[in-house]
Amino acid sequence: MQARDYLSPFTDLALEATAAARGDARTELPGVVMREERYDVATVSWVEVMPGVGEQTIGKPAGNYVTIDAPQLRRRNRDLQEQVGKILVEQLNKLLHLKEDDTVLVVGLGNWNATPDALGPRVTGKLMVTRHLREFVPADVAGGLRAVAAIAPGVLGTTGIETAEVILGIVERIKPAVVICIDALAARSVERIGTTIQIADTGIAPGGGIGNKRQALNRESLGVDVIAIGVPTVVHATTIVQDAFEAMAQSFAGTKPFFQLFNSREERQKLLSEVLSPTVGELVVTPKEIDELTEDMAKLIAGSLNAVLHTSVTAQDLLRYIN
């Protein structure tokens, strides 16, 4: 049985949710299958959540979640970004099964006026959108360009319209084969900000990671497959406090009477929840360099999507978006 997390820090990452469900015991989880592949610059983890028991175990919808973890991305090294971009292309091709004449709708979720939430709009601004040009492109060129449309619909607070309502109207009109949603995520670990990319074939519930979940964008709500791509840009402040408290508990175990009162992690979480929830329970934080991190990830994701959606896009074209 999964231990109750009294502090309940939100996370959008299935990999973190799986780790939390396991706790300190690295055992197999019912209904959850994991596998891992290591590259020189990144680790790729697949989490497959089975319907029913798997969903209950980690609290995520059934489906496949791919996490690309590249801690060195914060170094802003061009060669490193290029290698991670190629890994992203490889993983996207495993989830996307597109025909040459398929139309694809890319949705940039988030608020372009708030940097930690601006990843989606920034990605759509860098995409090669071609749906409106297909009829004018010569036949020998059109074969390498798929019909791609993109939109950044904004957020409910600035438009007065639920994002799902906007997207559903467009889907019904242009009838894409798949919708690809880009969004900023909330993570459990500070180290994942700007260094981790999650891809999921389950769709997405905007705002879920910060406790402001809106109507889900998935096959059930839109009638087409939905692929979600996200990058953590914020963590809950309580997470940072919890990590610091856990580090002190381990360092002073057996030497400081205070920590002996709380022998288990669950007891420590309960204590922190009681102390912090009334004041900082809903506070989320982001690093001061978030603008650079968001821009770098927007270029990397846009370049990778261009290479996946348009077969005529070369590796050099992908690099142009990473620079």
Image (cartoon, rainbow, N blue to C red):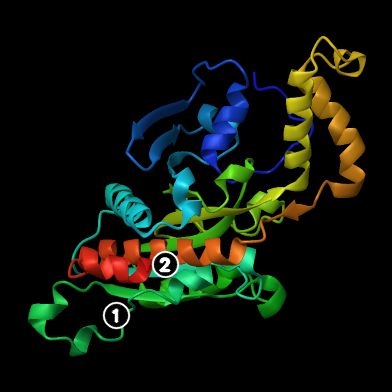
Q: Give the secondary structure at mark 1.
A: loop
The quarter in which the C terminus is drawn is: bottom left
Quadrant of the rendering where the N terminus is positioned: top right
Q: Is residue 57 visible?
A: no
Which disc, if any, is residue 299?
2
Q: Residue at x 39, y 70 (%)?
A: 105
Q: Amino acid at mark 2?
A: Lys
Front residue (pair 306, 101):
306
Q: Residue 114 appears in which quarter of the rendering?
A: bottom right
Position in image of residue 192 (x %, y %): 56, 45
Furthest toward the bottom, the residue is 136
Q: From the top left corner, tell me how far across and down residue 115 is, in percent.
A: 63, 68
Horizontal side of residue 196 vs 173, given as left or right: right
Disc 2 is placed on an element classified as helix
Name the residue at the top extreme: 254
Locate residue 166 relative to residue 133 in the image: left or right: right
As drawn, the label of residue 130 is 1
**On screen, residue 31 above or below 46:** above
Q: CA distance from mark 1 to mark 2?
A: 18 Å
Look at 42% across and 27% down and name the residue there.
33
Residue type marked 1: Thr
